[in-house]
Image (spheres, rainbow, N blue to C red):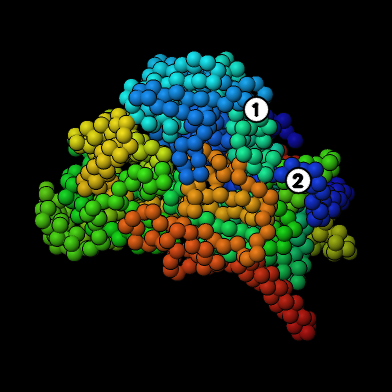
């Protein structure tokens, strides 16, 4: 791979991140409403609000004071104290929320990619077969169904009605574990339903794209040539059709991986999964500027990095884009 | 290319099979020596475990578990022993006695010096930065209401408080007493008070995971009655539907604030009791329509018509609001028709006034009143005194569907008067910003005509009454109402020691506010809670018979819980809407057990959302089956053709 291609991509990514840092400051302060007016409580006196604004640095002019404070702190990795969760550092709160989302959506993506691509490739190859009809039909239904509904259906059937799985959270609250394995088991029980919702929702996306991509390559000359050479069906599929059909899915995976951190807020909401998605929602409601800035920065950086990754993989798979 | 791909596929399959092994449902680990855990679900999260920083209802629940208030609350929300055991009043001097054996949860003795230090620190904070400036600025206000002047601790068991006027408001003050030995080095208004917390209350915060849960454990030194539970988890749900499911499944024991639909689907389930109360601390609030009465012109803002400044105009509009319909349709019957700005739930109904001349729903009368007041109808359009058609801009916060639903009804009724209304639903923060007046800091433009929103009260009427005072303009005022008599009464009632005489003054204020109608109070929403009886018994309502088990004044409900009590009959639903609220037409007598048909005359029900979802799931499976079957058939017929 050309090193100029790589340098250019990395440089672009860095510039994008710098742009995001600056935009981050302006964006949230442009929203109507301000943090100290959120609490619609008759007790809040004028003096209390003034004290609050002072503590949060909101009494200083937006530019340059607040802006300079923000940039200096961000560069140092200091996101400050949350407005909403009083007395909690933004970084502490986010650190606690990152891994639940990473596990849920990382695993969900993995399952969806594997199952979706296999299902898509097979149904595209055996176009018109039962797997194609069944798989494609189910994919379409799952793809078009909102996560919230899918999650609620799973919750009502498997948690409330059948009682196989717990309804909420990551662990059974108040449970004492006799061993680490017990704890992992409890975690797994809590993970299964949200994981199922995430991967079911994503499988459709991957399989539909893969299917059409495989159908396209099936008609290509090199596939016909391979078949004419007498190579077995399955080897033609795996050796010739699939690698070429993978190209568009790489872009999709790149985009989706960027959103692993953001998660599907609604899945987290349904299963009370303490991830970054729900944290974003809470921070938005409370106009928790420091929290929002930190989340969006992390989010933007992962999207940029995932896209950079996709660009690099794409460059490897398809030499044409490297120029 | 072929080899690596195959290898990758194999690896992926291996990962997949590993996951599927993990996915086998596992049996819950044995729970023999586990502590007894009470799990309480709420959609509102916790914002702070420093009592002086919290702004949320849940925060109050947590700090009243952590700390004793100077004076606590009993089962009818009456003043009861708290940090102090007894008290006497002699004019402006209060003498409190503290239990000789009182201890903090770390075993250190708790004395009058701790109480003196806490109150003195608040007074010092007020002297430095003004009243209402300590932390979130809510709790130190109580000392101001009670006109506290000085505090001393002549000995370890005696606390003496001197007030400027001989009032009784110190008894209803939310003043959590902090341990001096822990807080001496901290600033009350700023310290995060990280867990584990040391207090004198029944349960102490051991762990707080922001947005996830807060865990409290029993204080072994607590002086009061001991609840059955060793630990309390308050779990923060993101969706009320998920919380209701968790209660059904038994994953939580208590659900705070479920919706009317969920309330109905929970009522009558085995081991579940639903409680409706418009007379509990939780229901001490009103939903109002507020008019922009700002009298000076504002460049680029202000109300669209001067008519809103005219009490006669606002009064006439009040006759074109069918509040009973709002309660029935918007709240599904779970609430009381609104009237004055002090809810019937405040302090067990001690302060609420039913207005003498309640407005009735009568469109024709409203039209007549508008005509008399000089707002005539021309070509189907109601004109203001400047001759312009009245088109009102309604803004509602998006945080509750009840606001926009009410707006829809009211728009329909006012249309019949010839008044057009456009409604905009905005995020709460944005509505707040529109409601700011030029007097606010930062200044706003009072850019609205009418807003539907709510206010929550306190055990004392002061805070709700203060919103309509002239001094609130630039602060909390969202009507910019100003009335000299009201302001005068506001001062008089605050320094009136005799509750009976004070009630006469607050009654006059309520009546005045009702007649002048800067607010039209639409309804008092009932709180809908639910709890399970298979793990805990001894649930007691506060106030007795008409309130709620938890989330009341103080937190006595946690200390009465017992082991589950076997029930001979299915758990009834407790419905306690309106027994002490006069004038509420939907009033029922005291608690009415109401099997599965709850809902207080909610009319058409929306059905059981669960069975809908189940049906959805089944439909999905059938649909998939049909698709596969069709595909097979088509394939077979295609083969036959070949």
Q: Which residue is mark 2?
A: A187
Q: Which residue is mark 1?
A: B105
Asked whether the beta carbons under mark 1 and mark 2 sit within 8 Å of each other, the answer is no
Locate residue A143: give its quadrant: bottom right
Q: CA distance from mark 1 to mark 2?
A: 32 Å
Q: Is residue B155 above or below residue A267?
A: above
Locate residue A297: give its quadrant: top right
- Residue lying farthest to the bottom in this orientation: B641
Please give the name of the residue rendered at 18% of the width and 62% of the height, measured from the top-left corner. B365
As helix, strand or loop, the secondary structure at mark 1 comes to loop
Q: Position of residue B190 (x, y in %)?
A: 52, 22
Q: Residues within 10 Å of mark 1 (few under 14, many from 20)?
A: many
How many circles with numbers are drawn on the protein? 2
Same chain, labels 1 and 2: no
Q: Is residue B375 above or below residue A10?
A: below
User: Which chain letter matches label 1?
Assistant: B
Q: Nearer the viewer, residue B500 or A308?
A: B500
Left or right of A207: which side holds A284? left
Q: Position of residue A15 (x, y in %)?
A: 58, 29
Q: Position of residue A27 (x, y in %)?
A: 47, 34
């Amino acid at each position: 791979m050309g090193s100029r291609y790589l340098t250019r991509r990395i440089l672009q990514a860095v510039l994008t991140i710098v742009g995001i840092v600056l935009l981050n400051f302006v964006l949230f302060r442009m929203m109507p409403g301000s943090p100290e007016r959120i609490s619609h409580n008759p007790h809040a006196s004028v003096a209390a609000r003034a004290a609050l604004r002072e503590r949060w640095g909101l009494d200083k002019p937006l530019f340059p004071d607040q802006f300079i404070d923000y940039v200096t702190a961000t560069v140092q990795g200091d996101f400050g104290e949350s407005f909403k969760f009083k007395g909690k550092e933004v970084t502490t709160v986010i650190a606690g929320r990152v891994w639940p989302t990473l596990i849920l959506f990382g695993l969900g993506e993995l399952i969806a990619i594997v199952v979706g691509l296999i299902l898509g490739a097979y149904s595209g190859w055996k176009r018109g077969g039962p797997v194609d009809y069944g798989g494609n039909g189910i994919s379409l239904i799952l793809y078009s169904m909102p996560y919230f509904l899918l999650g609620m259906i799973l919750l009502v059937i498997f948690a409330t009605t059948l009682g196989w799985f717990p309804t909420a959270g990551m662990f059974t609250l108040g449970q004492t574990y006799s061993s680490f394995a017990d704890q992992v088991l409890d975690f797994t029980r809590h993970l299964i339903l949200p994981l199922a919702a995430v991967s079911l929702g994503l499988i459709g996306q991957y399989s539909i794209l893969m299917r059409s991509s495989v159908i396209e390559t099936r008609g290509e000359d090199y596939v016909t040539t391979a078949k004419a050479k007498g190579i077995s069906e399955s080897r033609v599929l795996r050796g010739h059709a699939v690698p070429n059909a993978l190209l568009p899915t790489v872009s999709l995976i790149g985009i989706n991986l960027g959103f692993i951190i953001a998660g599907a807020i609604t899945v987290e909401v349904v299963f009370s999964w303490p991830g970054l998605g729900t944290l974003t929602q809470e921070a938005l409601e409370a106009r928790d500027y420091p929290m929002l800035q930190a989340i969006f920065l992390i989010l933007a950086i992962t999207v940029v990095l995932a896209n950079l990754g996709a660009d690099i993989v794409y460059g490897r798979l398809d030499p044409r884009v490297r120029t | 290319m072929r080899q690596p791909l195959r290898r990758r596929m194999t690896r992926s399959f291996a990962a997949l099979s590993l996951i599927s092994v993990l996915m086998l449902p596992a049996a819950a680990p044995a729970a023999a020596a586990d502590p007894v855990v009470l799990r309480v679900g709420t959609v509102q999260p916790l914002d702070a475990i420093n009592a002086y920083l919290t702004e949320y209802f849940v925060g109050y629940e947590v700090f009243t578990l952590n700390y004793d208030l100077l004076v606590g609350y009993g089962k009818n929300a009456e003043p009861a022993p708290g940090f102090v055991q007894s008290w006497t009043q002699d004019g402006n001097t209060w003498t409190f006695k503290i239990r000789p054996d009182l201890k903090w949860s770390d075993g250190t003795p708790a004395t009058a010096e701790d109480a003196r230090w806490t109150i003195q620190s608040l007074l010092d904070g007020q002297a430095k930065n003004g009243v209402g400036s300590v932390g979130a600025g809510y709790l130190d206000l109580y000392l101001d209401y009670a006109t506290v002047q000085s505090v001393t601790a002549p000995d370890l068991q005696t606390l003496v408080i001197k007030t400027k006027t001989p009032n009784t408001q110190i008894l209803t003050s939310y003043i959590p007493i902090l341990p001096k030995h822990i807080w001496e080095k901290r600033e009350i208004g700023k310290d995060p008070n990280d867990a584990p917390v040391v207090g004198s209350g029944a349960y102490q915060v051991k762990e707080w995971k922001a947005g996830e849960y807060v865990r409290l454990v029993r204080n072994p030194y607590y002086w009061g009655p001991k609840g059955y539970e060793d630990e309390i988890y308050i779990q923060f749900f993101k969706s009320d539907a998920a919380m209701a499911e968790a209660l059904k499944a038994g994953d939580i024991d208590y659900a705070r604030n479920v919706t009317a639909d969920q309330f109905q689907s929970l009522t009558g389930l085995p081991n579940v009791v639903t409680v409706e109360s418009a007379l509990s601390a939780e229901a001490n609030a009103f939903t109002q329509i507020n008019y922009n009465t700002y009298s000076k012109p504002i460049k680029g803002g202000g109300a669209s018509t001067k008519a809103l400044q005219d009490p006669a105009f606002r009064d006439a509009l009040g006759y074109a609001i069918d509040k009973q319909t709002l309660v029935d349709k918007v709240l599904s019957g779970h609430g009381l028709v609104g009237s004055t700005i002090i809810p019937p739930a405040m302090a067990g109904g001690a302060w609420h006034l039913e207005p003498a001349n309640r407005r009735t729903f009568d469109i024709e009368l409203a039209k007549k009143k508008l005509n008399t007041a000089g707002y005539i109808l021309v070509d189907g359009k109601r004109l203001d005194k400047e001759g312009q058609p009245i088109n009102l801009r309604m803004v509602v916060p998006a945080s509750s569907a009840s606001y926009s639903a009410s707006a829809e009804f009211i728009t329909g009724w006012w249309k019949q008067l010839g008044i057009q209304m456009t409604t905009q639903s905005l995020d709460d923060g944005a509505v707040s910003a529109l409601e700011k007046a030029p007097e606010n800091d930062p200044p706003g433009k009072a850019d609205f005509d009418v807003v539907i929103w709510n206010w929550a009260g306190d055990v004392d009427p002061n805070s709700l009454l203060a919103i309509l005072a002239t001094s609130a303009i630039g602060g909390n005022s969202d009507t910019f109402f100003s009335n000299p008599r009201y302001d005068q009464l506001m001062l008089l009632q605050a320094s009136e020691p005799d509750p009976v005489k004070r009630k006469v003054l607050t009654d006059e204020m309520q009546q005045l506010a009702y007649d002048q109608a800067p607010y039209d109070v639409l309804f008092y929403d009932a709180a809908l809670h639910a709890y399970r009886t298979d793990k805990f018994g001894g649930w007691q309502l506060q106030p007795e018979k008409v309130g709620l088990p938890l989330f009341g004044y103080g937190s006595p409900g946690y200390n009465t819980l017992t082991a589950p009590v076997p029930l001979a009959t299915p758990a009834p639903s407790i419905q306690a809407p309106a027994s002490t609220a006069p004038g509420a037409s939907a009033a029922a007598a005291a608690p009415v057990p109401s099997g599965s048909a709850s809902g207080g005359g909610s009319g058409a029900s929306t059905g059981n959302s669960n069975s809908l979802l189940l049906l959805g799931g089944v439909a999905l499976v059938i649909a998939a089956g049909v698709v596969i079957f069709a595909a097979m058939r088509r394939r077979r017929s295609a083969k036959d053709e070949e």
